[in-house]
Image (cartoon, helix red, strand yellow):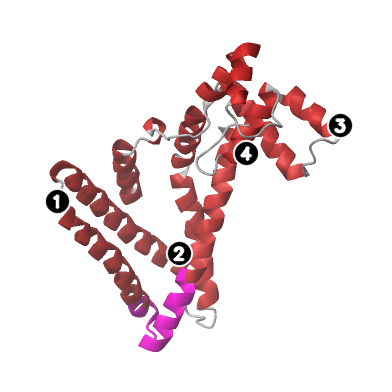
Amino acid sequence: MFTSFLFFLVFFSVYHMEELHVDTNFDAKEWQEIRAMDSVQLNKYLANLEDSSIHTKDQLIEKLASTKKKGFTISSYRDKKQYDSLLTSGAQKDNWLKRKMNYRQLELKEKYNGDSNKMIQALLGSFSHRFPQMLFLSLPLFALISKLIYIRRKDFYYVSHGIFAIHLYVFTFMILLANIGVNSLIGLTSWDWLNWVNGFLYIWLFIYQYKAMRNFYGQSRGKTILKFIILNIALLFLMVFIFVGFLIFSYLKV
């Protein structure tokens, strides 16, 4: 507990997701400028476009939003009323999930005055502060996966796997703390060769995990290597699932 507390104390002291600036290709300023155009300005703007099928501000905004291939874009719909109207008329056909996501995006658009950069900052801030919950949720699941991998070892109970998971998590926190220290030193000195130290830390993390599994469970090198690979593949899928789940939850709660 102390190691995890120390890690997150340092992590949130060094990294401030709320202050992260994200470049957006189609933000509030762009669509607000379009909204503010009078008919003369709009016609002049449209005259410079290759697409002659665009005649209104809404069509222009929708076209601009659809052509952006990178970055986060705000909803091209003006408001919920316009989106509902398109759904009712059949001009827009979205499934249940897409409707829910569009409604949520329209709510965020109104909440942050269409500023997509503020939306992303709020989302990343909310998501980053859920990191402790993600890790503590993964801990008993890590122990469960270990229990299934070593299911034939009747001398190891679920609690035993939990103790091993805690031990490995503590070492991981120590490696990540060292990584933060090295990154801070690189930022202060511009010594790029220190990236090799970070590479060594990550390699050592996996070496330590293998050695810890072999010493704790007492099996041969071949069996340990096989279960080491299976465990890490299972953990990869587990963390991706948890990551996506918490990201969606943060998006709904931001």
**Label 1: few (<14), some (14–19) or many (≥20) C-alpha neighbours in 10 Å:** few
Residue 231, horizontal then vertical, whole percent: 47, 72
Contact (CB < 8 A) between labels 2 and 1?
Answer: no
Describe residue 78's horizontal placement relative to residue 23 as left or right: right
Contact (CB < 8 A) between labels 4 and 2?
Answer: no
Q: Which residues are magenta?
A: 214-232
- 51 in relation to 140, above or below: above
Could you tell me which residue is drawn at 41 percent across and 32 percent down?
Answer: 18
Tag 4: amino acid = Ser
Q: Is residue 219 magenta-colored?
A: yes
Measure the alpha-carbon separation of dots 2 and 1: 39 Å
Residue 66, numbered label: 4
Q: Earlier in the sequence, mark 1 or mark 3?
A: 3
Residue 231, numbered label: none
Badge 2 element: helix
Given residues 87 and 176, the one toward you in this image is 87
Q: Is residue 4 magenta-colored?
A: no
Q: Residue furthest right?
A: 89
Badge 3 element: helix
Could you tell me which residue is drawn at 21 percent across and 48 percent down?
Answer: 181
Tag 1: amino acid = Trp
Q: Which residue carries the number 2 mark?
A: 162
User: Which numbered mark, 1 or 4, is in the foreground of this view?
Assistant: 4
Measure the alpha-carbon separation of dots 2 and 3: 56 Å
